[in-house]
Structures are given as C-alpha cells and as structure tokens.
Amino acid sequence: MIVITGGAGFIGSTLAKTLIDQELIIIDTFKNIEQRIYLTEIPGVRLVNLKDCKPILNYFKNDIKYFYHLGANSSTDQTILSEAVDTNIFWSQFYWDFCTNNKIPFMYASSAATYGDGSKGFSDKMTLNELKDIEINNVYGWSKMYFDIFVLNQEKIRNTPPIWYGLKFFNVYGANEYHKKKQSSVVHPFLKQLKLTGKIELFKSLNKNFLDGEQQRDFVSVNFCIEFMKNIQKQNMKNGLLNVGTGQPKTFISFANDIMNAFNKKGKIQFINMPQNLQDHYQYYTKSENSKTRKVHELMVDFNYSEDLKLIVKNIVNRIN
C-alpha cells in the first residue's frame, strides 16, 4: 500500500497514474471540480478526505510501504499565515511523525522557493545554518523552508523515518494543472494566448542584469520529476534534501519558442508590465545544482524533453476553448 497526499493535485495525480497497479490511498481536500478528470485516470483507489485521514492512516499503518507527501497550499501569492501554517507545516509535521513512529519511508515536496532570490545559490548541500541565512520573501517559500529546517533538526536528534527525502522542485510544468488557474506553470497561459491570439506575453524585466525575456528558469517537466523520484529510490540515495531540476536553465524567450515548436504554431512574443504583486519576490534566475544527484541524472539521460513537451502541449491544447 502506498499513500499520496495531494494525490488529486498536479504532481500527486501524475505520480498516482504511474502507480495504478499498486494499492493506493489518496489524501486530498477534493475542492476543485477540475480534479475529477485527474481522478478518472486513476480509478479504483481509496480516496480519503484530509480531515478524515488520521484514523484511516492509523488503521492501515502496518500495510503502508511508502508515503509520498505532495499535498500543500502551493500558491506563491498566499497571504494568510494561518492557512500556510496549517496546511504546509502542521500537516507535514503530523505525517513526518506518523512515518517516523511506524518506520515508513517518506518522500515530501519542498520547493526551490526556499532558495529565495537565489543570491545564496541553489545547492542542496547547504547546511542548516546556511539555510537559515536565506531571506524568503513570500509566505509559501517561508512555510516550505520552515518544514525543511524542522526536518533537519529532527535528523540531528535521530527522530526520522527509516528513509526520507525532501525534494526541492524547481519550475515544474505539465498537464493536470488546470485546477491551479493563475498559479499554473507558464505553459498553460502561453498556450492559451498562442492558440487564441497568436501571441505569447512575457514580463518586461525590472532587473538591469536581465533583458526583457532573458530571465532564466530551470523549467522541468512533471514527467521528468516522477521518473526522477523513482530513480532516487533505485539508487538508494542518502537521506536528505535533494534538488529536482534539469540544471540547465532556459530564458523565457527560448522556452516560449520551445512551446511554439511543440504546438507547431509560430506566434509573436509581446512584452508586458510585471504585476505589482510579483515584483518584490520575482525570481529572475533559477538553476538546480545537481552534483548531489549526479547518479540519478545519469539514469535520466535518455529522457526526451522535446517529445515529452509535445505530449504535454497536446493534452493542454485539447482543453483550451
């Protein structure tokens, strides 16, 4: 039996679809009607509402072989502290303790948002003190960093699951993001703009070190992430925080052109002003430092980014109207 929290969400539902031959427990709030489509792709699994999960987990505790904690409030513009603490910290600590007490391997979603503006680098080898020195400018990044630090403190006192990994996902894109609306990856709005208007809108740069459209992100496919997660387990990686990114950042102009090519539709790039609410915490550059997971990346050398993007684009475009 395998547990996936956030299993009706973006990464969680994509993972669940690859594990339908397993007995699955999916824990989520099931608030978004769009998620019903994801769930039809993973039929016959046990769906458990978040508020009801504690007795269910306790009942099946001896049967659970692996626990993926991917549930979170992932909105980068959230402002209600209590909601972030409840969803991203309290529940994460509960699952950590549950897996520790019952000796269940545990993998959870952290985020590259924990690197702040990137001025301290993007290394998953940072010490506890180095992580504490990073300035986080939004509630989401702060909540993810809080739990990372909690985990590292638990490791110091040897109060951990037998196997555990905290995955610092970089700029993940893919299908099954429809419920995220404005918080979806840029692939979704870019494709909608391209299909309906023949244009892709990119933010103008407010940083003198980056020209318009030359901002760079480590864009990584959700399908790459899922394979990466499975290969971490195959490699028996040492417990710890691990980056999940390509290590090869692309400019927004380059990524927009990749999307056009995958859609087989050329469009015009138009630069627009960056919204005020993004300006203070906008990341101009992200790059996963991957030396710690070199062996995992060696297993991924045959991953075909172009073909994968074509499949993702086809899935998304078919739902645009």
Image (cartoon, rainbow, N blue to C red):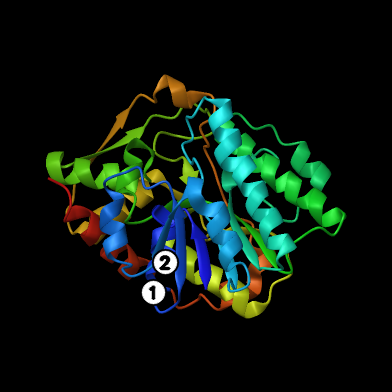
**Foreground residue among 11 and 31:** 31
Q: Amino acid at mark 1?
A: Ile
Q: Is residue 297 left or right of residue 119?
A: left
Is residue 71 visible from the viewing direction of this image?
A: no
User: Residue visible at 69% across and 32% down?
Assistant: 135
Residue 171: numbered disc? none
Q: Secondary structure at mark 1?
A: loop
Residue 16: numbered disc? 2
Q: Amino acid at mark 2?
A: Ala
Q: Is residue 17 left or right of residue 78?
A: left
**Foreground residue among 131 and 70:** 70
Give the percent coordinates (x, y) of residue 62.
63, 72
**Foreground residue among 320 and 21:** 21
User: Residue visible at 61% across and 75% down?
Assistant: 233
User: Residue visible at 45% across and 77% down?
Assistant: 22
Q: Are marks 1 and 2 in contact (CB under 8 Å)?
A: yes
Is residue 229 visible from the viewing direction of this image?
A: yes
Say which residue label 1 marks. Answer: 20
Vertical position of residue 2 compared to residue 270: above or below: below
Vertical position of residue 166 compared to residue 197: above or below: below
Give the percent coordinates (x, y) of residue 97.
71, 54
**Quarter assignment of residue 270:** top left
**Foreground residue among 1 and 290:** 1
Give the percent coordinates (x, y) of residue 175.
32, 56
Can you say which quadrant of the picture contains the C terminus? top left
For marks 1 and 2, give the CA distance: 6 Å
User: Residue visible at 14% across and 38% down?
Assistant: 197
**Quarter assignment of residue 64:** bottom right
Q: Is residue 18 left or right of residue 242?
A: left
Q: Residues within 10 Å of mark 1 (few under 14, many from 20)?
A: some
Residue at the limit of the structure toward the top, as seen here:
276
Q: Secondary structure at mark 2?
A: helix
